[in-house]
Amino acid sequence: MLRRLYDWTMRLSVHPHALGWMAAVSFVESSFFPIPPDVLLIAMVLAAPAQAWRIAAVCTLASVAGGWLGYAIGYLAFETVGAPIVAFYRMETEFAAFRDTFNEYGAWIVIVKGLTPIPYKLITITAGVTGLDFVTFTLSSIVSRALRFFLVAALLWKFGPAIRVFIEGRLMLLTTLLAVLLVGGFLAVKYLF
């Protein structure tokens, strides 16, 4: 099933309305869809490098808006909608532990986890379940999603098709490294100045 969804998503990248499809996939991935928008982002930026920043911006904004739906699922309908999504990813145990400490580090969790390939919908649903301040959630989502999608777009824009295999094979490593650098930079500023 995932392979068919992946192939369908790849076909969308060459569709005449690919940017609209990018927005739709980015939106639904933030709340329930299993295929990350990176698949479309990579194909679209390679096909139209001059549009890299526009594509990354659409991906970011649609992902954040979809995050609002994920937040609403967690806040308003966790038992009926959110719990089955968490169960689909077989992350009930992790979700319970994550939920307990979420609000203590909410903004940081959204920023750092939003950069990684961890399903973003788990972050958005948890934010809603725990009642994380909505403005904090939104601003943290903008930061994390923009960093992630603009990093991928920048690498593809600069290095073209040669970097595609590298990015697809090491997406978790790259985004984790970016997250470590980001958090390390903030901690350095906080404790050194």
Image (cartoon, helix red, strand yellow):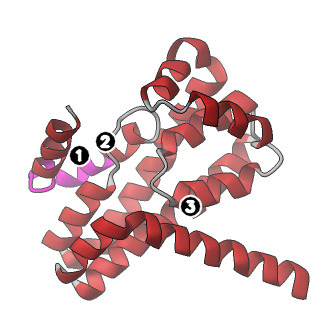
Q: Earlier in the sequence, mark 2 or mark 3?
A: 2
Q: Is residue 136 above or below residue 152?
A: above
| Residue 24's disc number | 2
Q: Nearer the viewer, residue 137 or 111?
A: 111
Instruction: Give the residue type that dot 2 points to.
Output: Ala
Magenta stretch in the rendered image? 12-24
Measuring from the top left, give residue 184's x and y in whole percent: 71, 78
Q: Is residue 185 magenta?
A: no
Asked whether the viewer can see residue 185, the reply is yes
Q: SS at mark 1?
A: helix
Q: Amino acid at mark 3?
A: Ser
Q: Nearer the viewer, mark 3 or mark 1?
A: 3
- Mark 3 or 1, nearer chain start: 1
Q: Is residue 56 left or right of residue 117?
A: left
* Magenta span: chief secondary structure: helix
Q: Residue at x 82, y 83 (%)?
A: 189
The residue lying toward the viewer, choosing from 57 and 165, is: 165
Q: Which residue is mark 3?
A: 144
The image quadrant where one finds the N terminus is top left
Check disc 3 and report its element: helix, strand or loop.
Answer: helix
Label 2 – label 3 distance at C-alpha: 19 Å
The residue at 47%/25% (across/down) is 85
Element type at marker 2?
helix
Q: CA distance from mark 1 to mark 2?
A: 5 Å
Pointer 1: what residue?
21
